C-alpha cells in the first residue's frame, strides 16, 4: 500500500485549494467516499475523502498489493485504477459498501514516509506513506 495526503484548503497541490466546484464537491462532503478524477487526459486517480463533512481533504491511493484476482501491475495511481477497473463512474461512491470497499487488513511491514511524488510543494513534510520493503510501491 502507498498513499499521499492532500490535507485540503491550505494545500495548493490539493484540488480543493480553490474551493467548492462541481469537480470537487465530494471532497467537501462526508469522509469515506471516493474522489476519482482524470489526470493527463488518460489516467484515472483514486482518492479517499478523509475529513469531516464541510472540510476538504483526501488521500491519493498510489499503489496496492493485490491479494486475489488481479494479475496486472498496481504500483502507481494510473496502473492501479486500470488494473482494478476503477473509473470516474465511482466518483462519490460510498467506500463502506458497494463495489469498491475499504477494509481493515493486517501487515507486518513498517510504514515509511517521505515527500509526495511529483509535487514540489512542502518537500519537507512527510505526506507520502508506504509499507517499507513492499514490492508494490510505485517508482
Image (cartoon, rainbow, N blue to C red):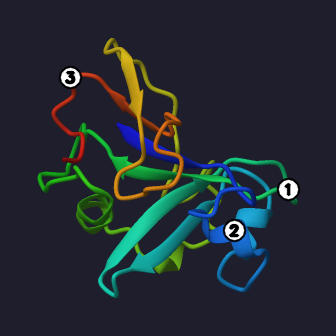
74 vs 26: above or below: above
84 vs 91: above or below: above
Residue at horizontal 73%, vertical 75%?
A: 18
Residue 1: give x, y in percent of width and height: 35, 37
Do residues under tags 2 and 3 come within 8 Å of each other at their CB atoms?
no
Residue at horizontal 38%, vertical 73%?
A: 44
Residue 70: give x, y in percent of width and height: 19, 51
The residue under label 1 is: 53
The residue under label 2 is: 16
40 vs 94: above or below: below
Q: Which mark is residue 67?
A: none
Residue 108: give x, y in percent of width and height: 33, 11
Residue 115, by quadrant, is: top left
Q: Kindly report which numbered mark, 2 or 3, lies closer to the viewer in this rendering.
A: 2
| CA distance for labels 2 and 3 | 32 Å
> Of marks 2 and 3, which one's residue comes earlier in the chain?
2
Q: Residue furthest left?
A: 71
Pick the front one: 96 or 120: 120
Label 1 Cα neighbours within 10 Å, binned few <14 / some 14-19 / many ≥20: some
> Of marks 1 and 2, which one's residue comes earlier in the chain?
2
The residue under label 3 is: 133
Q: Residue furthest right?
A: 54
Label 2 Cα neighbours within 10 Å, binned few <14 / some 14-19 / many ≥20: many
Label 2 secondary element: helix
Label 3 Cα neighbours within 10 Å, binned few <14 / some 14-19 / many ≥20: few
Label 1 secondary element: loop
Residue at horizontal 12%, vertical 52%?
A: 71
Residue 20, by quadrant, is: bottom right
Amino acid at each position: 500500500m502507498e498513499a499521499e495526503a492532500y490535507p485540503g484548503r491550505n494545500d495548493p497541490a490539493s484540488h480543493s485549494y480553490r474551493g467548492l466546484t462541481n469537480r470537487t464537491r465530494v471532497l467537501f462532503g462526508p469522509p469515506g467516499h471516493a474522489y476519482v478524477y482524470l489526470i493527463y487526459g488518460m489516467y484515472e486517480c483514486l482518492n479517499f475523502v478523509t475529513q469531516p463533512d464541510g472540510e476538504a481533504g483526501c488521500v491519493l491511493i498510489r499503489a496496492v498489493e493485490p491479494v486475489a484476482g488481479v494479475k496486472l501491475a498496481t504500483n502507481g495511481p494510473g496502473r492501479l485504477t486500470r488494473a482494478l477497473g476503477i473509473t470516474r463512474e465511482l466518483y462519490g461512491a460510498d467506500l463502506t459498501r458497494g463495489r469498491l470497499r475499504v477494509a481493515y487488513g493486517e501487515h507486518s511491514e513498517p510504514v515509511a514516509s517521505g515527500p509526495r511524488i511529483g509535487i514540489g510543494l512542502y518537500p519537507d513534510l512527510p505526506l507520502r506513506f508506504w509499507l517499507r520493503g513492499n514490492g508494490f510501491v510505485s517508482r
